[in-house]
Image (tube, helix red, strand yellow):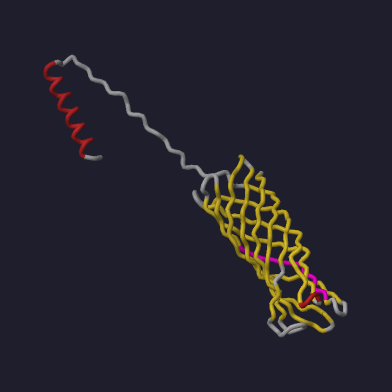
Amino acid sequence: MNRFAIALLAGVAGVSVMSSAFAADLIISEPAPAVGVVSTSGGNWDGLFLGAFAGYGWGTLTDEDGYFDPAGTEYDPTGWQVGVAAGVNFTVSEAIVAGLVADIAWSDLGGDFVGGDLTSKTDWQGSIRGRIGFDGGAFLPYVTGGLAFANNTLTDNVTPIEDTQTHIGWTLGAGVEFAVADNVSLDLQYRYSDFGKKTYDLNVPTDYSLTSHAVTAGINFRF
């Protein structure tokens, strides 16, 4: 309470005492002050959700053994991806929302390298992740991480011969969801994925490792 309020209350009390002395039958009534209630409730993020997303990716394919070029040579695949996701959110505390999510995407991440002698193509990729975020009401910023996998085909166009391997690694990223209706949200996300190293049989066994960056936009429906 500031000094002005204290002085004002003292003045009111003094006037009331003086009035009582001169007019005992005077009744002074004051209405009860209104008390405002401010809502601190968060967004409606709890429950199951299904979604779809699309985005762009770029990455690194590394020749670990030197099949065409010296060992350690890196190539730069790029491409689009379109996928679906499913998961569940649950409130941990007033401001914290945790969740689990799985996704799979059809992909054309790849390219032709070594003057066209080598072709790389990731047909699909996916992840199983945990995530934790801050409940900002209409928005939910979060971080996410977990298991990642990708199905990749390498083709030696000189022989020709090809081999397909499924890489398994990890992924880490961040994003934010924006509520646009009671049970609908838009999801913007960035993730880095390290899919690890696999051995491809291209005339001779050769190790290649694969990583990717992806920026996606999607829509989620909560139930």
The answer to whether residue 82 is left or right of residue 155 is: left
Compared to residue 52, the image places residue 196 above or below, namely below
Compared to residue 59, the image places residue 204 above or below, namely below
Residue range corresponding to the magenta coloring: 145-155
Task: Please name the residue shown 20% across and 32% down the image.
Answer: 8
Compared to residue 192, the image places residue 33 above or below, namely above
The answer to whether residue 217 is left or right of residue 32 is: right
Task: Please name the residue shown 25% across and 40% down the image.
Answer: 1
Residues 75 and 28: in front is: 75
Q: Locate residue 187, reporting x and y percent.
A: 62, 51
29 in magenta = no
Q: Locate residue 205, reporting x and y percent.
A: 80, 82
Q: Locate residue 184, reporting x and y percent.
A: 64, 43
Q: How many marks?
A: 0
150 in magenta = yes
Task: Please name the residue shown 15% across and 16% down the image.
Answer: 24
The answer to whether residue 18 is left or right of residue 64 is: left
